[in-house]
Structure formats: structure tokens, C-alpha cells
Image: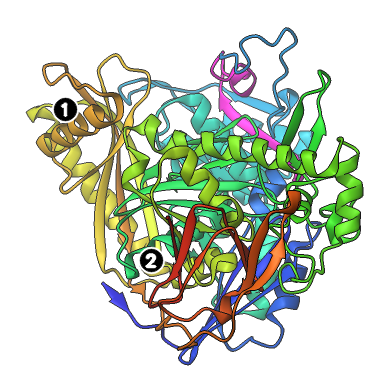
Amino acid sequence: MAEALDGGVLGVDVGGTFTDFVAIEETGIRTWKRLSTPSAPEEAVLAGAGSLTDQRLAHGSTVATNALLERRGPRTVLVTTEGFRDLLVIRRQERPSLYDLEPRRTPHVVARGDVITVQERIGAGGEVVTPLDDAEVARVVEEARALGAEAVAICLLFAYLRPEHEARLAGALRDAGFPVSASHETLPEHREYERASTTAINAFLQPAARRYLNGINERFPGLRVMHSAGGLTDATTSGERPVSMVTSGPAGGVLGALAVAKAAGHEQVITFDMGGTSTDVSLCPGEPRYRSATEVDGLAVHTPMVDIVTVGAGGGSIARLDWGGALAVGPQSAGADPGPACYGRGELPTVSDANLVLGHLRPDAALGGSVIPDLARAHNALATLGDPEASAAAVVDVANATMARALRRVSLERGYDPAGFTLVAFGGAGPLHACELATELGIGQVLVPRHAGVLSAVGIATAPEVIERGQGLLISLGPEASASINNTASALEGQAKADLQAAGGTLTALTWAADVRYQGQAHELRVSIDLPAPDAIVTAFHAAHEREYGFSTPERPVELVALRCRAQGATRTLPDLAADTTEDTGAPEPITLAGGVAAAQTSRAALAVGSTLGGPAVITQPDATTFIPEGWQATVDASGNLLVTPR
């Protein structure tokens, strides 16, 4: 169900280089950008929003991700079952870099000495093996005080099956004044490491997330926050579950890209969002795909999220020669401060500097609407790598190779032929690289949305309210599983509906998903199901396994690992995005690219609906720049999008 926008909405997406703003009003859309303030991201948000305090603010934030990457947070203590002290140290006993002679793991948010073990035990069947007594509860509270705990995470063995022990400890610690995250509330699913990791990260992020969101909520009461599962919720819920915000902005980009593409008649799309720090790609075969787990800086994070692959390739990605003399690009980024060399303060060569030297970015077109690029400074930065023009071409090639691998991961490696999809390119830098990547993957058309540089903010502003709740089960799927599934489904439905209502949403759709595997498999697939019933789950799983891995084994027993319920509010529709111009306002200007290649340059606003422009050409606009290579041609559709196809 869709509804019109009820009054003005201000969508905000905080990126590593720019913070994007989209004001959607009855009269149309206004967009602008502002350089981000990484040390205090709320400053850019509040300054950019200005006096628009009467508008409903929908916000995608990187505060949780940045705090985790920088390990910037409170002293967090983990409370776990006796014998599991080293849960966050041992992890999965996997070696991520198989041939690394001196492997190093990134530290977790909980130090090994900040773990309290408890004499209690719940068995694998949910039975009480060792009761939890009052003296043990009191001891845990005193140890937390002695350690100077500023946040507490609780993860007891099999608490997802029977949470009484966790609930008692959580209640006592909260009464003593500690902020607490309990695993049966944060992630009631099996796998002790993943559950403990996610719960500890949630506890670690809570103070920073609450301060940040409360500060914005004071200025914009009723603040809505984008979460990783592709929907909005209130600031209080987000502050309680900040771990759900780790892919906040990118999820908004997927929603915005899919909405614009569908309006233009493109159902099967791959979204390609290249910003200043990273590139996010996602395959959408008519709808977004979802998953339940990821890793952030080597740490397990299990939370519902749009299926997005992120790589460290953005406009600000730094180019360098490695110890062997080979060119490497990213994942380190110049960010907003000091930024790429061509922004006027940085000195290291970046992808943006390379595009400027190649002529794909124009020295007379302000980046983000405010930064005049410094061509001489970009030349000097790239000269540290060798000949500036040759180095620029090599930097772009290396960045493209990194992004092409990400596109293959979400398509070919998951059983989809990218040739059957439209590549939707957005972000400030996405349209610069999209056609070359489409050529690499055999994709036949690229769609550049009209508001490409701020499309994530558009997606955030128009996203529905969403709550997803899950419960671990780990049962064999046969007729005898019906009762357990029905009971779990009933509880999840009630919880999701109640949480959606508490967050201010009105239910319009209820959908189901399940994490399923063949008996004996170590990993599961998330599949969408029409009804939470054994037969429906098994049928959906066999089909998904066939598509993802090229085979299925119908005679093999199937296990349900977790059941998930997604409650969704109304989807808000975009206003009419018809192009402002009805006729061309002038012929493109001739320009010369690196190597003396003749090309054309024009502004996006100068292109009328139905007009075409063949490459090589550069199309500029305040929030993004599009490069059309030779052999490709751009056509403006009825909504002002650029549809770029091979000639």
C-alpha cells in the first residue's frame, strides 16, 4: 500500500564526504549537499537542515558504524555462562587470511578481562541444568561495579530458548543503574559467538547512538531513523537497537533506486551507489533481497538488513604504491577532512583526483554544489605515482576492478545473470564509472536517476515504517513442527505489530521469512515465504538452494534455523518527477579529455525529455557528474532520468 507524502519531509543521509539533504514538498523536490563533519556528524545535519524544523526529518546515519570502526565507546562488560569466558576471543576459530604468516584479529569491543562468568546453565532442549540463585545475581552486579562497567551485554547459553536467567540478571543490573543489552532481546537466535558479538556491539553503541539521536530529536521532534532492514523507526527504538543501524544510509539508497527504476519501467535492477568513501551494490530482482548477518571490521553482526555488498572504493579512496610497487586504491579514504587533493586541502591522490585529471570531472563544475575542484593540485598529487595522466587512468582501472568484483558477488555468485538487469547508478561518483562497469559485466543499460547524487536521502525520505522480529528455533521441518512454528509465528506477529505501533507506524503489510538449511549444513539461506508453515518453508528453500548453488536435494531433511516476521507501514510515494525543461536550452560545449580526446559537455538541466547525447560526453549537475564513454548514448526519459545504452 502506498500513500502520498503527508506534508513536508526532509531526508538526510550522512556520508563520509558529504551529507545529503532532500526536501520533498507538495511543490516538488529540493536537494543540496554539505561537507560532512566526521568528528561530530550531527553538526552537518543540523547546520544543513537550517530552519526547516517544521518538516518531518527522516535520517540515515553512519554514527553507529563509525563508532564501531573507531572503537569509540564505553567500557563494555560481557556477562556469560561459566566456561564461555573466551567466547569473543575464540570466535569461530576461522583464519580469514589463510596465507598470512602473521595473522592479526581486530579486537572486539569487550576486552578479555571485562568478562563476568555466571554459574547457571540452560540445556540445549531449554531445560534448566544449573539454576541461577540470588547470591550469584548479586555477585554479578558487584563485579560489574568493580570493573567500572559503563555498559553491560548479557549472553547466556541457550537464552534464546529460555530467557529467564538473562531476564533476572538484566533486571538486577538495570536496577543498579547499568545500561544493559540482553541477547534474548537483541538477537534471540542460536550460535553463541554471533549472539554474544551482536549483543556486545549493541551495548557498546548505545550511549553514542542515544546522545546523537536525542540531540537531533530535540531539534526535530518525531525524528525517524533508517535501519538496515530497509525501513524507518523512531529515535527511541533506534537508540535501544543501534546495531540495526550499521547499513542505514546504503539501505535507503537501495529503496530510492528501486523506486525510481520501477517508476521508469525497470523492474530488475542492480543498484550501484558510489560515494566519497565506499561503494555499495545490491541486486533487486523486483524487490530488495535481505539477509540476516554481516561482518563489520571483522566482527560478527547479526541483524536484519538489505543484502548489500560494500567495498572500499569511493571518490575519496586513496591511491598508493604498495611495498611491491603495485598500484592499490582504497580502502583508506581522504573523507571530508582533508578530502581529495582537488578539494583544496588534501595532498594524497584519490579517485576523484584521477577523474578530474582525465577530464571526467570538470574544473568549472562545483563538486557537491560548493567545492570548486583544483586541477593543478590533483595533477601534483597524481604525479607522486608517476605520469599524472597515465596514473589517473590506472587509478580508475583499479577502482573499477574492485567495484566490478562487488557487482559479480551480488549477481553471478548468487545465481543471477547481470545481463538481464539494469544498472542504477547514483551517489556523487556512481554515474562517472557506471558505463565502464556495465561493459565489464555485460549489462546492456544504465539508469542514472535525476537526483543521482542524493538518491539515498530520497529513499530515506520516502521509506515506510518497518519492524522485523525473529526467533531462533533449530527444528527439523516435518508435520510435527507445525505446532512449534505456529506458536512462534503467533508470538512474533504480536511482537512485530506492537513494536510497529509503539514506533508510530500503522500496519499495512505483514510478511514472513525463514532461515533454512539442509541437515548437516553449517550455514543457512534466508527465504521469503507466504505462510509460516513447514511445507511452504521447505518448498521455498529447495527453490532458493537450486537458484543460489545450482542444485537442490529434496530427499534430504531440512532444518528451520529461525523464523522472521516483518511488519510494514505505508510506503510513501514520490511526487511527480517530470523534467522541468520541455526543450533543449543549447548545444553541448566541446571539450578535450586526457590524451586529446574530443568530447562534449553539458548540464543536466539543459537536456530536454527525449533528447540524446552520444559519448564521449560529460553531463554535470550540482550533486553528481555523469560520464558517457565512446560507444554509449544517453537518452532523457519522461522523469528526467538518463537511460544510457550502447550505440
Crowding at dot 1, Cα within 10 Å, few <14 / some 14-19 / many 20+, comes out as many
Q: Which residue is mark 1?
A: 477
Q: Nearer the viewer, residue 6 or 389?
A: 389
Q: Which residues are magenta?
A: 69-93
Query: Which residue is more in the foreground, 487 or 635?
Result: 635
Foreground pick, 443 / 525: 443
- Tell me where residue 452 appears, x and y as whole percent: 54, 66
Q: Nearer the viewer, mark 2 or mark 1?
A: 2
Q: Position of residue 486 (x, y in %)?
A: 16, 43
Residue at the (75%, 45%) spot, across then down: 74
The reply, left or right, for residue 642 in relation to residue 215 is left
Binning the other alpha carbons within 10 Å of mark 2 as few (below 14), some (14 to 19) or many (20 upward) gives many
Image quadrant where residue 365 sits: bottom right
* Residue sitting at the far left: 479
Which residue is depicted at the point 48% across and 55% down?
A: 632
For disc 2, the marked residue is: 259
Q: Earlier in the sequence, mark 2 or mark 1?
A: 2
Query: Could you tell me which quadrant the N terminus lies in?
Result: bottom left
The CA distance from mark 2 to mark 1 is 36 Å
195 within the magenta span: no
Name which residue type carries label 1: Leu
Q: Is residue 105 above or below residue 182?
A: above
Give the structural element (helix, strand or loop) at label 1.
loop
Left or right placement of residue 433 versus residue 194 in this view: right
The answer to whether residue 85 of the structure is visible from this angle is: yes
Amino acid type, callout 2: Ala
Above or below 329: residue 549: above
Q: Where residue 559 sits in the image (x, y, percent)?
A: 23, 25
- Image quadrant occupied by the C terminus: bottom left
Relative horizontal placement of residue 364, taking residue 55 as reference (left or right):
right
Residue at point 91% right, 55% down? 377
* Foreground pick, 591 / 506: 591
